[in-house]
Image (tube, grey):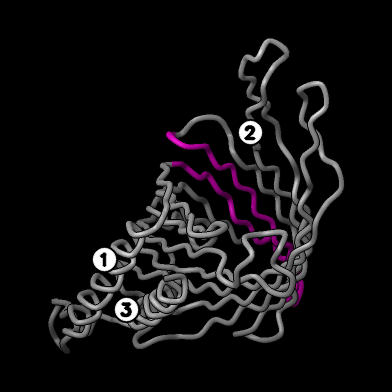
Amino acid sequence: MIRIKILCVFELLLQIYDFSSLYFNMFQGASVLVLNTKMFRCMNRLFSVFVLILALSFSVKSQSIHTSWIAAFNTIKLNDKFSIHFDAQERSGDRFSTMATLLLRPGLNYKLNDQWTVTAGYGYIANRRSFWLTGPADEPINVTGYLPEHRIWQQALFTHPVIGKNTISHRFRLEQRFLMQPSINNYKLSADGNTYANRFRYFFRSVIPFKQEFPFKSGWFAGLQNEIMINLGDKSAVNGKLFDQNRFYVSAGYRLKPAIDLEIGYLNQYVDGRGSAFTNNHVVQLAVYTRL
């Protein structure tokens, strides 16, 4: 079952990539944009694969949650070659309850050429953990708190044009993860040592302006992206499997000016757990992108 689900996710990646290559053709001397019929074929294939994944999901032990993510992705140029990367995210718990995760991720970018940029950085991720214990009078006690994860990461970003004047970006990221282990003393949660895990992430994203102009300076756009994550090496500290999670995201946004985008969208996060369990997270994401 897990092997089937992984194959479906990879098939979904291929369909999304195909869909991201769609474009609008302008008839010479006319002002009407004609949609390539390839879009409809890809949409049907994408929908079929996505429905198949959802159908498979119901055949295993699952947990469906609804959360919100607020994110800021920033690039600050230092010179022609170097820039600073910094993204910050706050993620809610189920039903938009208390903060479940705080993520802070700085890095240093180096531009190899117009298409390739490499980055190295550090990540601090505070995750909310909750444990039910039995009290001195046999009453249930919920112990909650935040345990940090520390990450060292490296990535390569490759951007290229697709048919027309749109572009697509591919990101290849390696993470060295230090996961803090929980310790409870006097009904208080603290960290007690850590376990180590490696992870590889492949991400692609395309921004498709509603108004086809180049360069795209301002106006409405659609965003389409997907990211798949796999565990490498010793997997005992995580879910014990190769496949970790997949994130599929569609959005609408507005470019205020070349350096600032505002965006809102839906993200489906599929997280594979231990055994046959998984979590299907339905996320409303608000994001701002700056390129200063």
Amino acid of disc 1 = Val
Type of the residue with mark 3: Phe
* Label 2: element kind: strand
Q: Which mark is residue 19?
A: 3
Residue at image mark 1: 51
Instruction: Name the mark on residue 74.
Output: none
Question: Secondary structure beneath disc 3?
Answer: helix
Give left or right: position of 104 versus 13. right
Residue at mark 2 to residue at mark 1: CA–CA distance: 33 Å
Task: Tell me which secondary structure the magenta stretch mostly adopts.
Answer: strand
Q: Height in image: 32 above or below 102? A: below
**Front one among 147 and 262:** 147
Residue 78 falls within the magenta-colored stretch = yes
Circle 1: element type: helix
Residue at position x 74%, y 55% in the image: 123
Q: Dots 2 and 1: beta carbons under 8 Å?
A: no
Three-letter residue code for mark 2:
Ser
Q: Nearer the viewer, residue 89 or 137?
A: 137
- Label 3 with label 2: CB-CB less than 8 Å: no
Residue tagged 2: 130
Residue 187 percent across, percent down from the top left: 76, 22
In-front residue for pair 88/183? 183
Residue 271 as seen in the image, left or right of residue 40: right
Q: What residue range appears in magenta?
A: 67-95
